[in-house]
Image: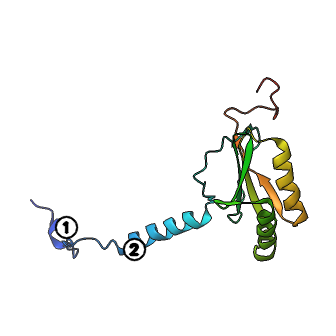
Amino acid sequence: MKNSFTHSFKSKLKPFGGRPDLTAMVDVLFLLLIFFMLGSSFVQVSGFKVDLPQVGASTTLGIEKFVITVAQADKKSQIFFNEQEVTWERLKQKLAEVRNNSASGTVVIRADRKTPFGVIARVMALAEKANVTAIVATMPAKEKKEAVFDPNEQ
């Protein structure tokens, strides 16, 4: 004897044979890509080799891309503003332009580890006179240490 309930109910669902529409998924992926690109803080590193010192603290700031690079070559310091070599006088002009045209008024200083502190101090003093905030770029320490200064490091 067959069960009468099994034959009386038939499904009205039919299998779908086409391809799924991927438009919505592609739109979401592009939106995520744009979100992460705009949300990331990216400072383009110039082609000049600079050996940055390591420190214990590290922060990520959302700042505009004004980079002062100080490279040490044969006991002479070379100064670059956004990858263009500048003189001290031209650097003063560029810092004044940053103050007048920038929303944040911030520059990043990338200095070689071998650069004398006097040169870095002079760049920072020029930034201060121009009323521009200067941030010194460093590499994060390889391991977390409490002390920022290591007296054994040369």
Residue 5 circle label: 1
Say what secondary structure mark 1 lies in. helix
**In front: 95, or 102?**
95
Please rate how many residues cluster around mark 2, counting C-alpha atoms within 10 Å: few if below 14, some from 14 to 19, many from 20.
few
Give the residue number, with chain letter if any, for mark 2: 24
Quadrant of image for the C terminus: top right
Say what secondary structure mark 2 lies in. helix
The amino acid marked with disc number 1 is Phe
The answer to which image quadrant residue 16 occupies is bottom left
Residue at the location (61% across, 49% down)? 48
The answer to which image quadrant residue 113 occupies is top right
The answer to which image quadrant residue 129 occupies is bottom right
Residue at the location (82% across, 55% down)? 123
- Pinpoint residue 100: horizontal percent, then vertical percent: 80, 76
Front label number (1 vs 2): 2
- The colour scheme of the drawn protein is rainbow
